[in-house]
Amino acid sequence: VAAFWEMGNCSNSDGKADKGVFQHQVKLAISPVGVKIPSVPEAYHTSVIVDDKEYCFTSCGVVCNQGCKSHARFQNGPTEVVHIGMSHISGEAMLDGLKHHFAPGTYDLLRKNCNSFVDCALFYLLRRRLDGKYRILEQMLECIDDTIGFVRILSMGEYMPNPKANNFNVGKILARIEAVSSSSIGLAGKKDGRKGKDSPGDVGKNAPDALWVKHVAAQLAMLPL
């Protein structure tokens, strides 16, 4: 089923940020995806919660839900909700700053998914990165699929790379957030680019090491199907 391969849903709800609140509570919601395979990293669906609103990236773009609606289809989801910190930036402001980079129809299971958005959202709100363990499997599979089409074979054609995600790069977005952090200039109107994947200077310190990802990906490719 196509929905299986998308880490999110297309439900949406409208909600304005409370302009009277200066401090906004930021949480990370986490749900494992699929069956745990020994010696292989787990896949995860993540979303960010600001105050009482959940923000998640799907094929419909960034959607806003009450509670953890995007985790409802996972068993006991979300399995974990972690308090990350307090931000002076509201969820609405974060959405306005990032939605241009996560437009409807640009979702890709491996290259531009829910975890990509959460990584950017946490940095926008708190200058924090999503722990690399939540993205390591998708990054390994991307390395493999780039060379032998592993995921396309494994999914029996269900997964196909989305050409609209070809120029997407988390690192470039994080660098732009850093560049405009002291000004009132928004991120709207700037185009995605590909340079130094996930590593805009010191911003990518918590991202998995690219050489290590490729090494593990090569080992994963040797596993029998």
Image: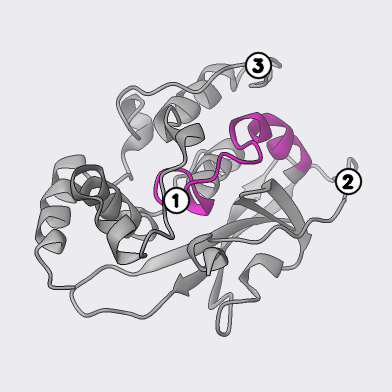
Q: Residue 183 placed where, x, y %?
A: 65, 15
Mark 3 and mark 2: Cα distance apart in space: 23 Å
Label 1 sits on residue:
130
Residue furthest bottom as drawn? 76
Label 3 sits on residue:
189
Amino acid carrying mark 2 in the image: Lys
Nearer-N-terminus badge (3/2) = 2
**Quadrant showing the C terminus:** bottom left
Question: Which quadrant would residue 180 be assigned to in this image?
Answer: top right
Nearer-N-terminus badge (2/1) = 2
Q: Which mark is residue 16?
A: 2
Mark 2 and mark 1: Cα distance apart in space: 25 Å
Residue at 23% in and 46% down: 143
Residue at 59% in and 31% down: 101
Mark 3 and mark 1: Cα distance apart in space: 25 Å
Q: Residue 117 placed where, x, y %?
A: 54, 45
